Image (cartoon, helix red, strand yellow):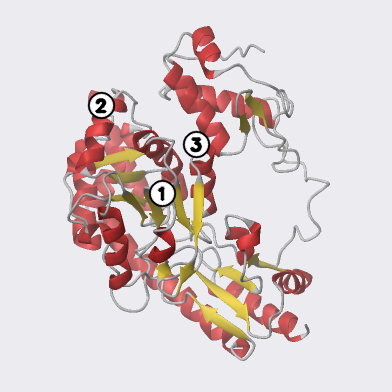
Amino acid sequence: MDLLIPLNGQDSRPLYEQIYQFIKDEIRCGNLKPQKKLPSSRELAKNLKVSRSTTQLAYEQLVSEGYLEAVPRKGYFTADIEGVFAPLSEHGSYDMKENETKEAHGEWKVDFSPRGIDLKNFPYSTWRKISRAVLKEDEKELFLKGNTQGDLELREAIRDYLHSARGVNCSADQIVVGAGNEYLLMLLSQLLGRDLGIAMENPTYEQAYRVLAGMGHQIYPVGMDESGLMVSELRRLPVHVAYVMPSHQFPMGIVMPVKRRQELLSWAQECPGRYVIEDDYDSEFRYKGKPIPALQGMDADGRVIYMGTFSRAIAPAIRVGYLVLPKELLGKYLEQARFYSSTVSRVDQKILTYFINGGYFERHLNRMREIYKGKHDCLLSALKPLEDQFEIEGEFAGLHVLLTSKRGMLEEELFRAAAHAGVRVYGLSGFFIHEEHAEKKNTVVLGYARLDEEQIREGAGLLLKAFSMI
């Protein structure tokens, strides 16, 4: 089939993003039915008169998000997403009519979601002030294309922050700024080569798994012990890349100790072309002792690829993440991927630069640490009556805790009991790469970032009553 995609040369978005958004909207509003075969990336590029890399990047993003399915030797097909999203209107906006088929517990009294952040305390007035100041400047360059890696001023601000707060050693030239970790993982996949197998902690951050698997990488789950990813198990796998979260593993909350970090670095140094991807997604929020320095700071051989984001620390809608590339991979980036346009608006980059350099970011972090610590302490205090029945883990950092039944109550039982009380909890088994690896089926995840202390106490009280009746 042909796709008539209206590309706008005056649109500030890159061409691949316009293609991606058009196909995504067509699928979500029902104009592209499930299992509809799309033209190949080569055919689409020819029809649209764009480079194949542009259409390939759009397709890969759609595959990684689950809108398309890539079938080997057959092509791309639209996925069946019926029931996943509220229907879209003709203009692509959500239909506000209540979904008649919503799940029985759609109205939750308390939702302990491990996703999201506290947006009530976002520094709206400061952000508005900086935004007005940036837009008042008659700086024509802000509306030009800019550096593909991100504006130098922002990369220097990120470098200074990472060095002082996380112990990362790098130059601004090694930093690549991008619109979210999904895009950065896709870019990284191209640099590493899609024939490389990748090891991931199990359980893990499912979005990273989806993106990397969607890019065609063979993913090898690696078990964890109390120190994190087991390097002894890693050594037996045919992989050259390991994706880890050493400062606060999601969802287990494990902080990888120095000895295990050294073992991981030794593994990477044993063969040329081995790398460790360090995802440092929420290291700012630690409540006992000082923040753990980044693994990258221990790396003397250029084996660690460091990833970070402002989504947790500031807001998800900021959509600014960054890679710190080892010098060998930086050379590959300059040769193979420098032609990609930056995916972050230069206006947003300027605002963020002012926010960091003006000291607002540090003050915001300090304030949010106190707020999250208050919520964290409130939750632990409210859960204290459950200590005889449950083991509480992951309580020293991050924005969630784990509850594991000492009596071996199954995850499904815990979920049903909580749901009956109007409380939503999340099973740990949902974070395992393969369901058969979900050994801890008696554990639930409780996130607290989006809740206030009154909601936390209410939810914990309802759980106490619900679980005592099982």
Give the amino acid at mark 1.
Val
State the residue position of label 2. Answer: 335
The residues tagged by marks 1 and 3 sit, at their Cα atoms, a distance apart of: 16 Å
Q: Measuring 31% from the left and 23% from the top, which residue is drawn there?
A: 339
Give the amino acid at mark 2.
Glu
Identify the mark nearer the N-term, 1 or 2.
Answer: 1
Quadrant in which residue 453 is drawn: bottom right
Disc count in the image? 3
* Mark 3: secondary structure: loop
* Mark 2: secondary structure: helix
The picture places residue 194, in percent across and down from the top left corner, at 43, 35
Q: Measuring 37% from the left and 43% from the top, which residue is drawn there?
A: 320
Disc ID at residue 239:
1
As drawn, is 443 to the left or to the right of 370?
right
As drawn, is 199 to the left or to the right of 261?
right
Is residue 15 visible from the viewing direction of this image? no
As drawn, is 138 to the left or to the right of 452?
left
How many residues crowd mark 1 within 10 Å: few (<14), some (14–19), many (20+)?
some
